[in-house]
Image: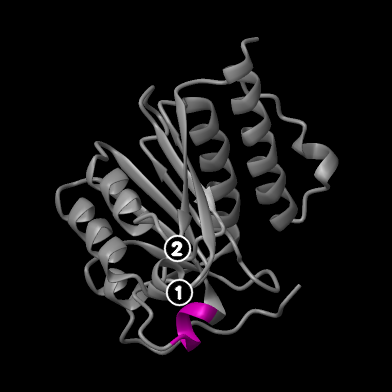
């Protein structure tokens, strides 16, 4: 394995460890060894336009965009998701229930109103993932993950980071499988104008 591939494998392992720990899976299960592939871009705030990078990845989607969100108030990213949905890309979002229903100016109701399928996850103390998975079934798949919430504060005021895995189908498929596990336990939010979904007990 080349040095670049080893670095890619380490980054993948760290990212997967965080995802699995959030899911309540023992960290020992995070020993998934994925080969280095494609490229990894690292971006940081303050300084880098992470919102623009995420929107660009969504704009490039051909088939599918899956999103795991905690706080979501960033309108630029929301507009990119709505536009992708409008052009026929399969867009699905799983968002933290409490953050969605209690955060002022949450962008998630806008997604629901636009017809984007949304699920609310109230099964954890916090559904704290921040992940965008683009075209997991294609060789050119892109996955974005890191500390960066999809919020204006994360872009303008916070110290945040993301890793963007491009042309790495293995990483995208691993995160897609994780998305589907969380989605299966979350509650579909049909219409933002309706009453909030019944509260599920925290576990």
Q: Residues within 10 Å of mark 2 (few under 14, many from 20)?
A: some
* Span colored in magenta: 99-103
In-image side of 26 versus 13 (left or right): right
Which type of secondary structure does the marked residue at label 1 adopt? Answer: loop
Which type of secondary structure does the marked residue at label 2 adopt? Answer: loop
Between 61 and 38, the one lying in front of the other is 38
Tell whether position 100 is magenta.
yes
Image location (x, y in percent) of residue 65:
35, 47
Q: Residues within 10 Å of mark 1 (few under 14, many from 20)?
A: few
| Numbered label attached to residue 46 | 2
| Numbered label attached to residue 157 | 1
The reply to whether the C-beta atoms of the residues labelled 2 and 1 are less than 8 Å apart is: yes
Q: Is residue 14 above or below residue 34?
A: below
Residue at image position (62%, 34%) is 12
Q: Is residue 136 above or below residue 53?
A: above
| Numbered label attached to residue 27 | none
Colour setting? one colour
Between 47 and 4, the one lying in front of the other is 47
In-image side of 111 versus 188 (left or right): left
Q: Please identify the quarter of the rendering in which residue 52 is found.
A: bottom left
Question: Of label 2 and label 1, which has the lower sequence position?
Answer: 2
Q: Quadrant of the N terminus?
A: top right
């Amino acid at each position: 394995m080349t040095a670049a591939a080893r670095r890619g494998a380490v980054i993948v392992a760290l990212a997967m460890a965080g995802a699995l720990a959030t899911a309540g899976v023992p960290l020992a299960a995070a020993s998934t060894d994925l080969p280095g592939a494609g490229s990894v871009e690292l971006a940081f705030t303050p300084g880098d336009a992470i919102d623009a990078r995420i929107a660009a990845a969504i704009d490039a989607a051909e088939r599918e965009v899956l999103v795991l969100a905690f706080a979501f108030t960033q309108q630029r990213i929301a507009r990119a998701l709505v536009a992708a949905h409008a052009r026929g890309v399969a867009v699905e979002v799983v968002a933290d229930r409490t953050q969605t229903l209690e955060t002022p100016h949450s962008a998630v109701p806008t997604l629901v109103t636009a017809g984007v399928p949304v699920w609310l996850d109230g099964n954890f103390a916090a559904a704290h993932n921040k992940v965008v998975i683009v075209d997991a079934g294609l060789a050119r798949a892109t996955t974005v993950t890191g500390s960066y919430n999809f919020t204006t504060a994360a872009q303008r005021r916070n110290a945040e980071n993301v890793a963007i895995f491009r042309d790495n189908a293995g990483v995208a498929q691993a995160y897609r499988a994780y998305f589907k596990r969380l989605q299966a336990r979350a509650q579909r939010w049909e219409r933002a104008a309706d009453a909030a979904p019944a509260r599920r007990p925290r576990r």
